[in-house]
Image (cartoon, coloured by chain):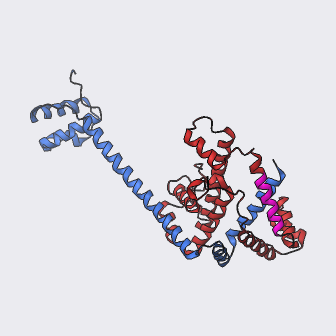
Amino acid sequence: VDKRTDALDRILDAIEKSIETAPVDDLRDELKAEGHEPSSIATQMRAVLTRVGKRHRQAKLDLARHEKAAALAAYEEHRPKLPNTPAQRRLLLQQTIARNPHLTLQFRDLDHHSDADVESALRDLAHLGLLPDEED
Amino acid sequence: VSAKRRVPEEKAATLEEVEAAVAALTDDDLVRIAHFAKRRIERIGRAADMRDHEDLAAEAYELTLNGSRSWNKDVSFTQYLLGVMRSVSSHWAEKYRTEMESGRDQVRTDVDVRMELVRGERGTNDPRIAEERTQKLAAIRALFEDDPLASNILAGLAEGLQGPEICSLLEIDGTTFSSKLRSMRRDMIRAGLKRPTKTEKGPWRGQAH
């Protein structure tokens, strides 16, 4: 490595380091000497950071929306094929429960389940992979 | 740039704390951040590749928000951001150097080639760059040749001595050293001796082809 290059970097490092602790009035003077208006520089810098913050929040929001949409799409795509009549669906649910003794009591109390509840439970069980295959 | 610094969990700021710290930055803080960012951009020269001090601050903050960098609350947010900007700009410079050394021969379009020619870019082994740096160092030394204290401080820094060692050798106190360094910085800025290279921005910002 060129010794002169090292020397230049060392000098610039020290000069740069001095900015960290310099009185801010000095920094303002130096910016003015370069033709900048310090208050404008500060305003612009604040705007930059605010814009980055907003963009980050928006990106997180967009990602959450995207993930929700993707999850809904996946749910719809894997919509299980259920029996046509409420009675057949209730029967299927009973059979599924009988095959899966580990299911909670919530699923077992079928007398209090509406047809819609039964259908919803079947869909949930289908997504869990607990419904019997059609050929079963 | 994406390498995450290890900060003890209890000292790492949450996203909310980071956002609160940014909201609480004063104009003085922002002036310091902008000043520092400008110096870094000037220092890395061509490697900035049309990015300015605002781009540098934006990237440093973005890396914090996305979790690539973590603010240790033991230091002020301003000091932290300066450190990230130093690191980010060093990364840009290193990436540029690597690309130049590899000759960008892997995926290089005609446009890339033309732009390199327009900007006069070559590898860091390019004697032009070495020459520019030599001239820069000579110009800094020349600026202070009539100032014995500044010249001695420069000599010490160039040799890799730390502030306390230089103070000891020159028999000055820390306040005198810091004050002199600040006045040297001011003189260098006024003399336009900030840039290690002459043409950084390319044709988009007024550089003649």
Left or right, A10 with reference to A51 = right
The structure residue drawn at horizontal position 63% and vertical position 64%, both measured from the top left corner, is B38
Q: Position of residue B126 (x, y in %)?
A: 74, 45
The residue positioned farthest toward the bottom in the image shown: A25
Seen in the picture, residue B60 relative to B189 is either above or below; the reply is above
Splitting the image into 4 quarters, where does residue B157 fall?
A: bottom right
Per the rendering, the colour in which chain A appears is blue
Q: Is residue B195 visible?
A: yes
The residue positioned farthest toward the top in the image shown: A135
Per the rendering, the colour in which chain B appears is red
Q: Position of residue B171 (x, y in %)?
A: 89, 73
Seen in the picture, residue B47 relative to B143 is either above or below; the reply is above
Say whether residue B127 is magenta. no
Q: Is residue B76 visible?
A: no
The structure residue drawn at horizontal position 85% and vertical position 63%, both measured from the top left corner, is B156
Q: Quick one: B15 or A23, which is closer to the camera?
A: A23
The structure residue drawn at horizontal position 75% and vertical position 49%, both measured from the top left corner, is B128
Q: How many marks?
A: 0
Splitting the image into 4 quarters, where does residue B146 fall?
A: bottom right
Say whether residue B142 is magenta. yes
Q: Quick one: B63 or B123, which is closer to the camera?
A: B123
Q: Give the residues in magenta.
A: B131-144
Left or right, A123 with reference to B25 = left
Left or right, B12 with reference to B193 = left
Q: Main secondary structure of the magenta part?
A: helix
Q: Position of residue A75 (x, y in %)?
A: 27, 39
Q: Position of residue B54 (x, y in %)?
A: 55, 62
